[in-house]
Image (cartoon, helix red, strand yellow):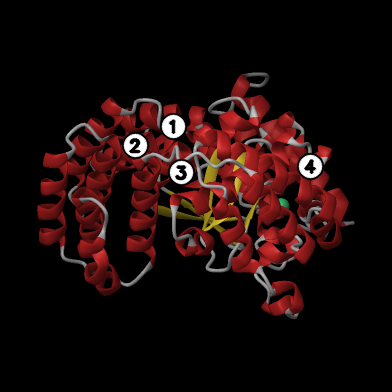
């Protein structure tokens, strides 16, 4: 699990291959029911203890770690995902932000993340949102849904839950968590109450629909497993190790208990115990790429780069298309003094997820170490653009444009960054 501060430290994404895979497993039946193309929507965790979940484009459902840890059951989490999926499927996302081209460029993603920061309750000015062209009033307008949209999203969400075999009563439980918040002063509300206005009418309508629904108990142990694993790993990284070690044995399965313990020992840090626990865990699930990924992280952070290369290599062999695992493998290769091989792997990671600032940082190092300063400057420029530091991005993009062959694909990328930086500069005048 790695923290990425984006942009300008206002919003921190918690990127973890295991947690994202688990959330994907929970989201899949919901997204299918919503008719959203399979594999097109990613659930991403924001490090924030307040309660919120929101969508800003058709590719991501953002959920605060606080809300994820607050959920009691897989069904409650699926209720959150179903409601957000319904906002997507029912066309509630402002067209400006839904433009696919827009959200698939570095500068476009910067705007999306600045908007995410604004939705998280961060000061949009601190988030660089204003400088990227998202005014605070504009972001508030586009982030919060109307009451009509809320009702329509609830209505669809309950249908998705029924078709996914989740208990729709969880939607009522979810709304009850937020009940009464609209009476609170805005500063004391969870941001969810602002982005998803809740009224007593809305709660009543949901209750009526759930009561009328013939809920078939099609729920699977599988959903419970992935929910417990995502929550267990997230809490092991976010809470004190002592908190985790007191509770790990209460996990629903032995492997989740070991996973939580391994992370807690690693964070103490007690590397010997962490690695011994990992060995037991890997013996139980030898073909689980996400456990090899964690093994690699523990080894790398314990300065055992060679062993980390092997662990990440195993993870990558089991999940060859996972950008986060490839990123870890590349990082381990760099640490082990293999920049050439690292470069290949990190380029694969970047091709699958251009928005990972950590990969861009490592990639720039790999290019610099292999003597390609033009590419090192380009990737650095892209990383700054992504994190909202457009002035810095401009300096590096200019350097890259001077060094790269004019008209080549990388040179064109440097021009993209330059025009984003110029657009930003002219907006500020
Ligand atoms: Zn909503």
- Measured along the vertical axis of the image, is residue 315 above or below residue 272? above
| Precedes in sequence: disc 4 or disc 2 | 4
Q: Is residue 341 visible?
A: yes
Residue that mark 2 sits on: 330
Q: Which mark is residue 349?
A: 1
Alpha carbon distance from label 4 to label 2: 39 Å
Residue drawn at (54%, 54%) of the image: 170
Give the x, y percent position of residue 228: 35, 52
Q: Secondary structure at mark 3?
A: helix
Residue drawn at (26%, 58%) of the image: 251
- Measured along the vertical axis of the image, is residue 191 above or below residue 327? below
Alpha carbon distance from label 3 to label 1: 20 Å
Nearest to viewer (mark 3 / mark 1): 3
| Precedes in sequence: disc 2 or disc 1 | 2
| Precedes in sequence: disc 4 or disc 1 | 4
Residue drawn at (60%, 26%) of the image: 410
Camera-nearest residue between 346 and 47: 47
Q: Is residue 396 visible?
A: no
Quadrant of the rendered image containing residue 194: bottom right
Give the x, y percent position of residue 365: 41, 42
Give the x, y percent position of residue 69: 45, 62
Nearest to viewer (mark 4 / mark 2): 4
Alpha carbon distance from label 2 to label 1: 8 Å
Alpha carbon distance from label 4 to label 1: 32 Å
Alpha carbon distance from label 2 to label 3: 24 Å
Residue that mark 3 sits on: 23
Categorize mark 2 by other alpha carbons within 10 Å: few (<14), some (14-19), many (20+): many
Q: Secondary structure at mark 4?
A: loop
Q: Secondary structure at mark 2?
A: helix
Mark 4 lies within 8 Å of ligand 1 (Cβ measured) = yes
Categorize mark 4 by other alpha carbons within 10 Å: few (<14), some (14-19), many (20+): many
């Amino acid at each position: 699990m790695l923290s990425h501060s984006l942009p300008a430290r206002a919003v921190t994404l918690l990127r973890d291959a295991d947690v994202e895979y688990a959330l994907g497993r929970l989201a899949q039946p919901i997204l299918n029911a919503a008719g959203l193309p399979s594999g097109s929507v990613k659930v991403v965790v924001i490090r924030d203890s307040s309660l919120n979940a929101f969508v800003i484009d058709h590719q991501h459902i953002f959920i605060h770690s606080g809300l994820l840890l607050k959920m009691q059951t897989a069904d409650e989490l699926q209720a959150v995902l179903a409601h957000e999926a319904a906002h997507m499927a029912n066309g509630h996302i402002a067209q400006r932000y839904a433009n696919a081209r827009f959200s698939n460029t570095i500068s476009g993603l910067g705007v999306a993340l600045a908007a995410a920061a604004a939705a998280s309750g961060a000061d949009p000015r601190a988030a660089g949102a204003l400088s990227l062209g998202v005014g605070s009033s504009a972001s508030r307008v586009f982030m919060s849904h109307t009451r009509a949209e809320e009702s329509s999203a609830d209505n669809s969400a309950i249908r998705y839950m029924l078709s996914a075999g989740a208990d729709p009563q969880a939607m009522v439980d979810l709304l009850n968590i937020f009940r009464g918040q609209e009476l609170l002063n805005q500063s004391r509300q969870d941001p969810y109450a602002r982005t998803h206005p809740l009224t007593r009418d809305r709660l009543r309508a949901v209750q009526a629909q759930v009561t009328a629904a013939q809920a078939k108990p099609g729920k699977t142990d599988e959903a419970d497993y992935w929910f417990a694993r995502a929550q267990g790993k997230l809490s092991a990284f976010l809470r004190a190790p002592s908190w985790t070690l007191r509770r790990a044995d209460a996990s629903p399965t032995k492997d989740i208990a070991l996973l939580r313990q391994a992370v807690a020992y690693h964070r103490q840090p007690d590397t010997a115990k962490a690695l011994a626990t990992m060995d037991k865990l890997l013996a139980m699930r030898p073909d689980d790429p996400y456990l090899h990924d964690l093994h690699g992280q523990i080894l790398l952070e314990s300065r055992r780069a060679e062993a980390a290369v092997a662990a990440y290599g195993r993870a990558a062999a089991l999940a060859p298309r996972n950008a986060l695992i490839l990123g870890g493998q590349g990082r381990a290769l760099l640490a082990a003094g293999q920049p050439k091989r690292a470069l290949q792997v990190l380029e694969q990671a970047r091709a699958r997820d251009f928005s990972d600032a950590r990969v861009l940082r490592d990639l720039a190092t790999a290019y610099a170490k292999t003597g390609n300063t033009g590419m090192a400057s380009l990737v650095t420029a892209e990383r700054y653009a992504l994190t909202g530091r457009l002035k810095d991005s401009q300096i590096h993009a200019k350097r890259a444009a001077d060094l790269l062959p004019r008209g080549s694909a990388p040179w064109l990328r440097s021009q993209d960054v330059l025009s984003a930086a110029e657009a930003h500069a002219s907006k500020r005048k």
